[in-house]
Image (cartoon, rainbow, N blue to C red):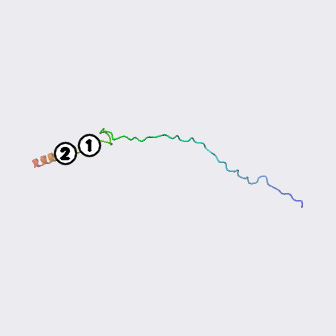
């Protein structure tokens, strides 16, 4: 009846409870944006309004190509 309970001092260490780390970040500011509600501009530059000038350019360019083609064909026929 005379026994001692021996507890080792170098027992397995118990892990500490988890620590929750809270990192405070600044909240982004809300910026008000407005949609640009305007009619189409009348300048023919850029991609937004120059459709008429593009079609005129393409017509003139195609006429020039046809004339150059006919001229080159006439020169070839005259040599032969």
**Residue occupied by mark 2:** 63
Q: Residue at x 22, y 45 (%)?
A: 59
> Mark 1 Cα within 10 Å, few/some/many (few <14, many 20+)?
few
Report the front residue among 34 and 66: 34
Q: What residue would you read off at disc 1?
A: 52
Nearer-the-camera pick, 40 or 10: 40
Nearer the observer: mark 1 or 2; the answer is: 1
Quadrant location of residue 67? Answer: top left
Which element carries disc 2, helix, strand or loop?
Answer: helix
Q: Which mark is residue 67?
A: none
Residue drawn 19% across and 45% down? Answer: 63
Residue 52: x %, y % from top left: 26, 43
Which residue is painted at 12% across and 47% down in the image? 74
Which mark is first along the chain, 2 or 1?
1
Left/right placement of residue 30 relative to residue 11 reads: left
Q: Residue, x 11% and y 49% (percent of image)?
A: 77
């Amino acid at each position: 009846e005379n026994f001692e309970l021996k507890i080792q001092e170098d027992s397995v260490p118990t892990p500490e409870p988890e620590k929750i780390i809270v990192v405070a970040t600044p909240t982004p500011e809300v910026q008000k944006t407005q949609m640009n509600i305007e009619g189409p501009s009348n300048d023919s530059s850029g991609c937004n309004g120059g459709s008429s000038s593009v079609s005129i350019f393409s017509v003139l360019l195609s006429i020039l190509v046809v004339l150059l083609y006919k001229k080159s064909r006439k020169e070839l026929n005259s040599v032969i």
